[in-house]
Image (tube, rainbow, N blue to C red):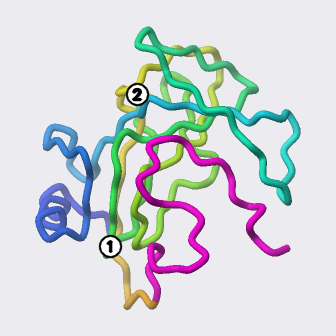
Amino acid sequence: MILSDKTILEEIEKGTIKVEPYDRAFLGSNSYDVHLGKWLATYREHILDAKKHNEIEVFEIPDEGFVLYPHIFYLGVTAEYTETHEHVPFLEGKSSTGRLGIDIHATAGKGDVGFCGNWTLEISVKQPVRIYHGMPIGQLIYFPVLGEIEVKYNQKKDAKYGGRANKPVESMMWKNKF
């Protein structure tokens, strides 16, 4: 089951869902539109290593936009900071974004109950495309949880992501033990 617009509004009023900045115009029938923040990043090295801290270079999207190219992996960030305390948030691309050949996540479209932060986007494109900060980039949908949550994401000692990072965050895979 996906939350409807009325239910999302009720949850925002209760404080179980938070979106900052919030604008009622971006609430769809069963989703909330999020926008591209002003920062992008690329990895410094061409070959990434899952056991190593792969560093990124962060840069600002100029007002005239920035052209993304195929075969380059970009990290972006949502302009919106979100909190979800009783539901599972999913971030999906908007159809208009997809029709430009822009993918906004490689595999990380699902958040956890208790995620609080700006969403890092894993962006790739099919052909060159100019993007702009503030453009609609995705939509959040919310699913109810069956059963009680023992430990929410923001309460985990080993949580690697979250917080008010308005810039993209690189992979923290290297913090895992394997």
Q: Quick check: 168 above or below 99?
A: below
Residue 8 at x, y percent in the picture: 20, 60
The amino acid type found where label 2 is placed reads Ser
Q: Residue at x 78, y 62 (%)?
A: 174
For mark 2, give the secondary structure. helix
Please, what is the dominant secondary structure of the magenta stretch?
loop
Residue 111 at x, y percent in the picture: 47, 63
The first of marks 2 and 1 along the sequence is: 1
**Residue 30 or residue 156, whichever sits in front:** 156
Magenta stretch: includes residue 101: no
- Residue 34 image-quadrant placement: top left
Residue 98 at x, y percent in the picture: 49, 31
Q: Horizontal placement of 82 versus 41: left or right?
A: left
Magenta stretch: includes residue 167: yes
Look at mark 1 in the image and give the residue it sits on: 85
Label 1 neighbour load within 10 Å: few <14, some 14-19, many 20+: many
The amino acid type found where label 1 is placed reads His
The circle drawn on residue 96 is 2
Label 2 neighbour load within 10 Å: few <14, some 14-19, many 20+: few
Quadrant of image for the C terminus:
bottom right
**Residue 89 or residue 134, whichever sits in front:** 134
Residue 52 at x, y percent in the picture: 84, 55
Q: Residue at x 50, y 31 (%)?
A: 39
Question: Of tags 2 and 1, which is closer to the observer?
Answer: 1
Quadrant of image for the N terminus:
bottom left
**Highlighted magenta segment, given as a residue range:** 151-178
Q: Residue at x 39, y 62 (%)?
A: 116
For mark 1, give the secondary structure. loop
Q: Residue at x 75, y 70 (%)?
A: 176
Q: Quick check: 27 above or below 60?
A: below
Q: Horizontal placement of 141 versus 108: left or right?
A: left
